[in-house]
Image (cartoon, grey):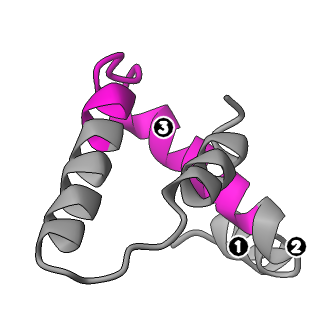
Amino acid sequence: MTDSAKKLLEAASALPEDERLELASELIASVDGPPDSDWESAWLAELDRRVQAARDKGHPAPEWGEVRARLLSQLGR
């Protein structure tokens, strides 16, 4: 790692957690290519499937509406 990258990492590490997470997501996106438009809907469908599977087994599921709203809020949706 170059000195400039080390300095950048040190500065980024001092940011609040939410800003570090946003920065990390943006950095990954910058090398990962354009977002897959189907990814979000596929992931939400998978989460719904897992919640239903847990309910089918008699396990209490968290309030999905709250969890989903929080995730979508963090995604800026």
The answer to which of 50 and 17 lies nearer the viewer is: 50
First in sequence: mark 1 vs mark 2 = 1
3 or 1: mark nearer the eye: 3
Residue interval drawn in magenta: 20-43
- Secondary structure of the residue carrying tag 3 is helix
The answer to which of 5 and 31 lies nearer the viewer is: 31
- Secondary structure of the residue carrying tag 1 is helix
Vertical position of residue 5 compared to residue 30: above or below: below
The residue at 30%/52% (across/down) is 47
How far is disc 3 from disc 1 in space, using C-alphas?
A: 17 Å
Query: Which residue is denoted by mark 3 in the rendering?
Result: 29
The circle on residue 28 is none
Task: Identify the image quadrant of residue 58.
Answer: bottom left
The residue at 79%/66% (across/down) is 18
Task: Identify the image quadrant of residue 6.
Answer: bottom right
How far is disc 1 from disc 2 in space, using C-alphas?
A: 10 Å
- Chief SS of the magenta region: helix
- Secondary structure of the residue carrying tag 2 is loop
33 is within the stretch colored magenta: yes
Query: Which residue is denoted by mark 1 in the rendering?
Result: 9
Vertical position of residue 19 compared to residue 7: above or below: above
Instruction: Tell me if label 3 and label 1 are in contact, CB under 8 Å.
Output: no
Q: Amino acid at mark 1?
A: Leu
Query: Which residue is denoted by mark 2 in the rendering?
Result: 15
